[in-house]
Image (cartoon, coloured by chain):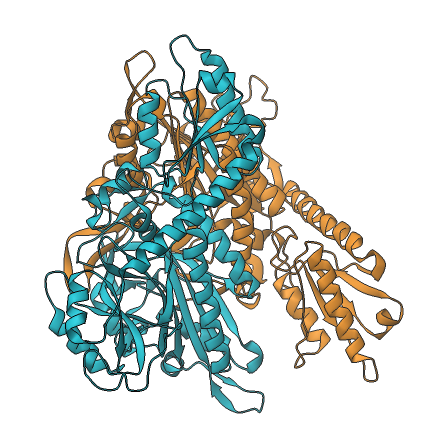
Chain colours: A orange, B cyan
């Protein structure tokens, strides 16, 4: 079936993406961008409430700075794109394109931060980044250029940094659950999976039932003082002593939209949660031979006007070269949450027919109740999508306690919850032992919401005492 | 004086810009970004009303596509940055970074546009572009990477395209005059100065009195059918015949902010028009030795709260390591439109003292009238800045009719309005004859608002019959 991986066909026919003539780059069409803008409006307003300010740092990084943090550069170096020429001339020194901006920004944090009154320093930028990956480019999920926000903050104390990590993670959870209708698990990444050069990484993790893979939704890192050490970000504290800042960085990207496509899409195409749909309602005239075509078209236009005035995003499809049936399929493919049909009978009865994209339910709405009923239905669709996704995801969760159970669950594409000793060598060992054409299993996260762990529980993989419950699986 | 060119020092001390370790790239700090965001919110809403939709095309361009339109590539090729490596590997084919996106987008316009029902196609993107210039990098005005919006639209008829060119140009005028308080002239560029590969270019032109240079503020191009021919953007019209689209492209960039700095800045630093200022009001406590410090601080906090609740952007400067005098200079340098001081006398009299950045006027405001008076003053500052800039600009306009008058006016750094024969060779000739270390004179635009041109008027440069009044000068 088309959705065994990201439904590449459906994002094209649904007019979200166009393939581009450079592999791994994709055109994001308006149907995609409006989702991005809606999430951006929410997130940007929330971080402004937290007194985080927007800035814009350059796209380019000089090689010296890029290589300053060793673990960090090891993580990114193989994917860095290099500019070596301008016009016909070779540059004196090749210049990197940012894969992320820690090393771009922190030399200036060092310059701007002098005393405790300069803290906290809390900046964010909305920008593009480039990671020249070679494995299976996929729209949204693995593209060589993508859009994201990256927040970079510096604090006087670890406590403040720790607290912000979680505040941001909660915003990421809300983007997924309240906007994209996708259930996520909040948790901590393992040492092996954490951000290169950071202290610890938290994430929201989603799961795609039909592929049996976890997917990292967004990450909020505490960088500790490691970058501060490399970039000499020091300050004079209130006692007049020299101290080093504590830093965080956090990001979510256009990958969020790919997760949405995979979680909600079905055989008919895309399914857009109402909160992020560019068009929440499409109105389609259904005239018959001898019908009052003008009356029907006017009723459609009036319906769109009423809905738009009430704050909904609605449009009519008046094209005269397509049949109503063709239009139904077209807008279903694009995932519009609610379709309104108006035919002669509806006109006669002062009603419209509404058809839900999520469950195909049809209901006749008296014109007088239009706004109220549409509001109710859209709210209900939004809720229902999250609920349905949660049920499907939960049905995939498998608790395992032994290696055999683990292997069995993995073959059944489960989201595996297992007691783990939390040792890096053991995770490496699990990866080696599960290698195969489907990809190895790895930790997704240790959920903050931990089930009880009886004292003598053993690690499913090492047989040593377990320290925590951890989600495992294959992932994107 | 510092402002003979763009006041590079003032954008650094005013915390708008930080110089970056790659020449020609600059860090845009929050004080800059909030101006950009305010203009963006306005423009984005306006173009959405015009049913223009946002999209995002890739940063990268393959060389074949870039070179498709000959005049166009000649205009941009010397400044194109090329990616030739990723990680340690050489790319098979070098890949360009977009200097603008005509050639990135139009192959897909050709794919998406089939019939007249697919028209108009109206897209816009907010993005970064790269032009690797070698001459005098300057923050905002000439930087190797900058932010902009670029709109790209296709129509069935030239009439629709012509009309949109002017609608967009009017939005650019509003950005300059209503937001940045900068007077601009709307007009048409000469053949020599028009967009490479386009049919005609309109622009809004500003003028910097103290440097005597014109500056192109933003451009709205009609591309005609030239790109359509190259990229085969055809459609079947209503009669079933094959036809070719008419296209526009239009853009404004972070250069707008540089123009603002140059037009309004003075010896004390930046001057922000209230409509775009990140902080419109700064409140500074002015305690004396035996004064009720707590009472003063509370009054400052209450003032900020009252103003913020009324929709103003206000903040207090409570730092305890700086004197009030230091703070006055600091916020003057940053260009905050209105400073409010609260000292013991103000506290006793239930008043605050307000000091305007634009004209240093001081006024005591009873606390009870705070919101109303602040609103009045900010409106007045906004108006006054535009009016003052207009007077200064107008005082520089010099009407000339002969070559000698032209040369004299040029040496006096005037904005020259002259009758011109509108011949490309003549403009080239003027450029050659005025070459020098200050740069050559060129046309800025032929204003839409043309003074009367008596029938026998001759061109100031060629002595042939004049066709129109045109602005000339040195420019950025």
Residue B61: image location, x then y, percent: 33, 66
Determine the residue located farthest toward the right in the rendered image: A349
For the question of whether residue A72 can be seen, the reply is yes
The residue drawn where x is 34% and y is 55% is B391
Number of numbered callouts drawn: 0
Residue B150: image location, x then y, percent: 41, 63
Query: As drawn, is A365 to the left or to the right of B223?
Result: right
Residue A176 in the image: above or below residue B355: below
Q: The C terminus of chain B appears in which quarter of the rendering? A: bottom left
The residue drawn where x is 75% and y is 74% is A297
Between residue A82 and residue B429, name the one nearer to us: B429
| The quadrant where residue B433 appears | bottom left
Residue A109: image location, x then y, percent: 30, 33
For the question of whether residue A467 can be seen, the reply is no
The residue drawn where x is 36% and y is 51% is B388
Query: As drawn, is A219 to the left or to the right of A22?
Result: right
Determine the residue located farthest toward the top in the rendered image: B290
Residue B471 in the image: above or below residue A116: below
Between residue B376 and residue B338, name the one nearer to us: B376
Between residue B147 and residue A345, name the one nearer to us: B147
The residue drawn where x is 48% and y is 72% is B164
Query: As drawn, is A200 to the left or to the right of B403?
Result: right
Residue A223 in the image: above or below residue B427: above
């Amino acid at each position: 079936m088309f959705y065994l991986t990201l439904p590449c066909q459906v994002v094209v026919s649904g007019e979200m993406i166009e393939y581009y003539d450079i592999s791994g780059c994709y055109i994001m069409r308006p149907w995609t961008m409006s989702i991005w803008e809606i999430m951006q409006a929410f997130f940007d307003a929330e971080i402004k409430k937290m007194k985080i300010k927007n800035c814009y740092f350059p796209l380019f990084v000089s090689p010296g700075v890029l290589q300053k943090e060793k673990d960090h550069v090891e993580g990114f170096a193989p994917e860095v794109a290099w500019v070596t020429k301008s016009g016909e001339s070779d540059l004196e020194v090749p210049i990197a394109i940012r894969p992320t901006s820690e090393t771009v920004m922190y030399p200036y944090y060092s310059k701007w931060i002098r005393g405790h009154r300069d803290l906290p320093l809390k900046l964010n930028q909305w920008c593009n980044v480039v990671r020249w990956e070679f494995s299976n480019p996929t729209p949204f999920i693995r593209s060589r250029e993508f859009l994201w926000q990256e927040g970079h903050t510096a604090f006087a104390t670890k406590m403040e940094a720790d607290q912000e990590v979680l505040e941001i993670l909660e915003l990421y959870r809300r983007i997924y659950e309240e906007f994209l209708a996708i259930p996520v698990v909040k948790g901590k990444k393992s040492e092996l999976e954490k951000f290169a050069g950071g202290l610890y990484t938290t994430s929201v993790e989603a799961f795609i039932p039909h592929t049996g893979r976890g997917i990292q939704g967004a990450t909020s890192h505490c960088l500790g003082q490691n970058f501060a050490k490399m970039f000499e970000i020091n300050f004079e504290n209130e006692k007049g002593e020299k101290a080093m800042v504590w830093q965080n960085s956090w990001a979510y990207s256009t990958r969020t939209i790919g997760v949405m496509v995979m979680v909600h899409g079905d055989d008919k195409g895309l399914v857009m949660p109402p909160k992020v749909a560019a068009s929440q309602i499409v109105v389609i005239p259904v005239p018959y031979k001898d019908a009052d075509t003008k009356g029907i078209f006017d009723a459609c236009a009036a319906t769109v006007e009423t809905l738009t005035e009430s704050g909904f995003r609605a449009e009519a499809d008046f094209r005269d070269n397509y049949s109503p049936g063709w239009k139904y399929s077209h807008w279903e493919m694009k995932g519009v949450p609610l379709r309104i049909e108006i035919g002669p009978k509806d006109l006669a009865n002062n009603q419209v027919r509404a058809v839900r994209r999520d469950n195909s339910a049809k209901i006749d709405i008296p014109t007088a109740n239009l706004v109220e009923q549409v509001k109710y239905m859209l709210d209900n669709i939004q809720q229902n999508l999250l609920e349905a996704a949660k049920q499907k995801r939960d049905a995939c969760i498998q608790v395992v306690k032994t290696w055999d159970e683990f292997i069995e669950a993995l073959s059944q594409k489960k989201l595996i919850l297992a007691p783990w000793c939390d040792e890096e060598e053991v995770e490496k060992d699990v990866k080696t032992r599960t290698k195969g054409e489907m990809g190895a299993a790895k930790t997704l996260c240790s959920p903050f919401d931990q089930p009880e762990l009886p004292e003598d529980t053993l690690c499913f993989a090492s047989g040593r005492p377990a320290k925590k419950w951890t989600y495992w699986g294959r992932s994107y």
